[in-house]
Amino acid sequence: MGEATFVPNDLLVSDVPVITRNITIVSGQNLKRGAVLGNITASDKYTLSASAAADGSQTPALVLATDCDASAGDVVAAAYASGAFNSTKLILGAGHTAATVEAAFRKAGAPLYVRVLK
């Protein structure tokens, strides 16, 4: 398996408790910290969530906590399962906006929040 690295930025905001968990990023992608991930139901692996997907990953579920190069194979990486995020620092897949991601987190009852900072 490949490696994941942590690169700090101002992705996290607010005093919402931060919880991470290790997940598997499906091969064939190079993702940066802040990528909004969806779960591929059949494999229980994660990919950048795109609204037009039909494999379960169309629903935003987690936020990637570290840069992750899975271009050569699956990679285990940390993802945020709880936290508040600066909307301008999130990396969104095709068809998603900060509002649609926030709505998906609310619908799932996930302790993940998207904040629009001024």
Image: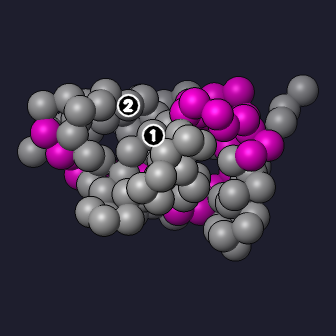
| x and y percentages locating residue 83 in the rendered image | 63, 56
Looking at the rendered image, the quarter that the C terminus falls into is top right
The residue type indicated by label 2 comes to: Leu
**Label placed on residue 73:** none
Tag 2–tag 1 contact (CB < 8 Å): yes
Which label sits in the foreground, 2 or 1? 1
Q: Amino acid at mark 1?
A: Leu
Residue 61 in which image quadrant: bottom right
The number of discs equals 2
Report which residue position mark 1 lands on. 48
Residue drawn where x is 46% and y is 34% of the image: 33
Left or right, 73 with reference to 39: left
Which residue is at the far right? 118
SS category of the residue bearing label 2: strand
**Percent x, y of residue 71:** 20, 29
Q: Which residue is mark 2?
A: 31
User: Observer-nearest residue: 21 or 18?
Assistant: 21
Magenta range? 73-100
Is 96 covered by the magenta stretch? yes
Crowding at mark 2 (Cα within 10 Å: few <14, some 14-19, many 20+): many
Q: Quadrant of the N terminus?
A: top left
